[in-house]
Image (cartoon, rainbow, N blue to C red):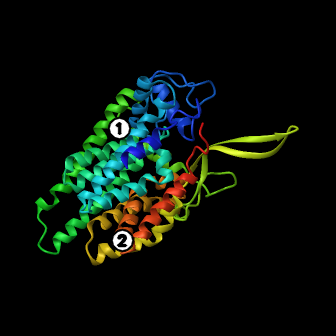
Amino acid sequence: MLAVSFLLRVIWLNLPPGALIFDESFYVNAARVIAGIHPPAGAHYADQPLFLDPNTEHPPLGKALMAASILVFGDNGLGWRIPSLVAGMVALVALYGVVRAAGGRPWLGVLAVALYSLDILSFIHGRIGTLDMMSVAFLLVGAWLALRERWLLAGAALALGTLVKVPGAYGLVAVVLWQGLALWRTSRTHRLRWRDLAPTGALLGAYAFVGLAGLWLLDLRFTTYANPLDHIDHMLHYGFALQGAFNPSGDITSAPWQWLMNQGQFDYLRTAVNSLVNGTVVGSRVTIEFRALLNPVLIGSVWLAVPFGAWLAWKRGEALAAWALIWSAANYLPYVALSLLANRITYFYYILPSVPALAVLTAILLVHGRFPRIVVWAYLAASIVAFIAFFPFRQVP
């Protein structure tokens, strides 16, 4: 599964030649500046001072990793995208580790990884030069370590995910909620003692130390902020300032509740070849289309998978189902609250960190739902067909 996933992500990684896909126009150019390369005239950050991060609305770690990749592999598609490629593969391995650490059987882990690898949104972000997949990879590694009770390492990994992108903090919320559930279960059998709180304290302490010290060190090298608190204040103000109505004409914003119906889709990059007759366009054929959408088979089954997982977690104490519910909720519900209470604009790809948990819940439904084996194979086949239908390259380049 990992070999096939890698091949599908690495093929034509450098195409289309020289083209930036969606937010690569921000992050690749920021990485270029950090690497000491001037972006093309008229591009984002073309006039910014070299070796400093011009994209200060996010922490510098992800862009610094991209800059290092550019210096090693060149200022081209490979250099821009290899960090996301590596992160996508790490996320697949970490998800398998999460399933096993939470008590899932090996083939349940393989099925969850298969469904996750067939998700179009996750696939695309695992091969374009943006920050999202790097953050998700660190967060899933942190979740895996937390399930294995490696609290200090878990806190450090979650902090690194936040140092790539601020919403990585929701991963910490998920792990703390998971630990809170464990404490609640402990309190039902005996009175809580201080040592029962030690794991949570270690997790939070490691997260705070690595997060603040890491941001301070990154700022010393890549920004002009005197201390991490000033930078955090700027990032939070920037985030809350993004307000407005959803889906105005021609806009790409969408409401969080739309994502659950696969609505709010938009193109990251679309290339078409026109057919001309006597100078008149008589037809058009799409050759490349990077589109923000979830695998329709996966998101369509979530409406069954989530309640089934909730039933398993409540009635049978299924640990993996409980983890998946907590992880998906902690990474999704904050956007609902922000959109309703703060009028914060949101985008379809914000659901990306929740997708691994949705894949796990769907795998649980297929394995524990006592469906005939033919149903499971038919579901996988439908997922593969949908993946092929939305594969970004519609013809061999």
Which amino acid lies under the numbered mark 1 shown in the image of this protein?
Pro
Q: Secondary structure at mark 1?
A: helix
233, above or below 373, in the image: above
Q: Residue, x 47% and y 71% (percent of image)? A: 303
Residue bearing mark 1:
228
Residue 7 x, y percent position in the rendering? 44, 41
Q: Residue, x 58% and y 49% (percent of image)? A: 291
301, above or below 245, in the image: below
* Most foreground residue, 98 or 239: 98
Q: Residue, x 57% and y 26% (percent of image)? A: 46
Residue 282 x, y percent position in the rendering? 82, 46
22, above or below 195, in the image: above
Q: Which quadrant is home to the C terminus?
A: top right
Residue bearing mark 2:
309
374, above or below 198, in the image: below
Q: Is residue 197 visible?
A: yes
Residue at far front of view: 374
Residue 351 x, y percent position in the rendering? 47, 56
Quarter of the rendering containing residue 147: bottom left
Residue 396 x, y percent position in the rendering? 59, 39
* Most foreground residue, 82 or 112: 112
* Most foreground residue, 149 or 207: 149
Q: Which mark is residue 39?
A: none
Q: Please tell me how crowded label 2 is: few (under 14), some (14-19), or many (20+) other residues with Cα within 10 Å.
A: many
Quarter of the rendering containing residue 331: bottom left
Which amino acid lies under the numbered mark 2 shown in the image of this protein?
Gly
Q: Secondary structure at mark 2?
A: helix
